[in-house]
Amino acid sequence: ICRKFYLNLSPNIIIMASEFVDREKEFSRLKKIVKECSKGKGNVVFVTGEAGAGKTRIVDELGKYAENNNFMLLKGRCAFGAESDPFLPWIDALSLLGLEYLFAEKSPGVEYVFVVDNNTSLLLGEIKREEVGVDTQIFTSMLGAVQDFVSDSFSKFGKGKRKLDILGYEDYKILIDYGDFVHLVVVISGAENNFLKNDMKKIIENIEKNYAHVLKKWDGDLDTIKGIKNFIEPLIPKYDISSLNPKLRREMIFRNVSEKLVQISKEKPVLLFIDDIHWTDPSSLNLLYYLSRNITKSSLLVCCAYRHEDADKNLINLVRLMEQGLWDRII
């Protein structure tokens, strides 16, 4: 569980609200937190005080310091009167990276799955949702488009592992991920998410772990690879979104955002700042609490500023919940 730091920037402690020099003690502590985060100790920081106490000023200085130490800086702001807009500050912060899709209420529904041999381009296994309404002609055309794309891609970049490709085809998205011997094609409705992407990687790893000796010199004998279908069959029921209730969908969003931010922080430390969190919605607060429990071994630092006189009961309750035995006060 990560530590939480409460920075009391009340004017009766910081005498000159517009001058940063009076806060060296607090800023030194913040710099220490940034350094710890860069070494893999994720954290959540609250900066609070009355209006005009200089919260934004100290956070701006923190942002400059973090960027000078190779951090990626993301900023989101809550808006007065927008408390009914789910995840507004998070979407604002992550839109710079094109990650709005992480908050899509409609998660992906897996319609088709194919496993294709890299060398021969032959199907090694396929499954589809029984009730899917795509006719055979569209299915055949879709498969042909995928084969053409993969063939062109192999000719340009060679065969083997590389980043996932995403294609659009009518009302569907086609996700293609690559292994040393096979590529996995998943056709979805809705928005892709990290769970599905991670599952695709795991499926490829398991297929190649169990069938590499066959695939290296595969002669087209389907009997030798018929067990491959067992690895892809669970995707259909797992991503049957019609069966998910709103609570589970919201949980998927939390996990999506958490895993993506942690993944990004592995490449470059991240400081994510949310201003005026006293105006935020309950879903955003729940996401913040979820992150506080799941980023402790990452290089992600989340900093939230709020006016304590405007904090509603949801924010106060969250602060109290996160405070229980975990709080360092800096005054």
Image: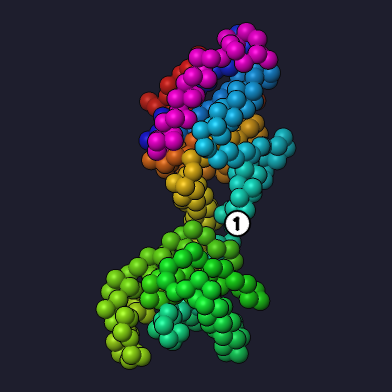
Looking at this view, is 229 or 287 the one in front? 229
42 w.r.t. 126: above or below = above
Which quarter of the figure has residue 121?
A: bottom left
293 w.r.t. 317: above or below = below
**Residue 212 in view of the camera:** yes
Looking at this view, is 271 or 303 the one in front? 271
Determine if the magenta segment contains residue 40: yes
The magenta span reads: 13-42
Q: Residue at x 58, y 31 (%)?
A: 63
Determine if the magenta segment contains residue 104: no
Q: Residue at x 63, y 11 (%)?
A: 11
Residue type, mark 1 in image: Tyr
Is 191 on the left-hand or right-hand side of 6?
Answer: right
Q: Residue at x 64, y 23 (%)?
A: 57
Is 168 on the left-hand or right-hand side of 247?
Answer: right
Q: Residues within 10 Å of mark 1 (few under 14, many from 20)?
A: some
**What secondary structure is the magenta-colored segment mainly?**
helix
**Which quadrant is home to the N terminus?**
top left
Residue furthest to the right in view is: 81
Disc 1, SS: helix
What is the x, y in percent for residue 70? 52, 37
Q: Which residue is mark 1?
A: 101
Count of marks, rendered view? 1
**Residue 316 in view of the camera:** no
Q: Residue at x 41, y 82 (%)?
A: 119
Is 204 on the left-hand or right-hand side of 176?
Answer: left
What is the x, y in percent for residue 262? 46, 46
What is the x, y in percent for residue 241? 52, 66
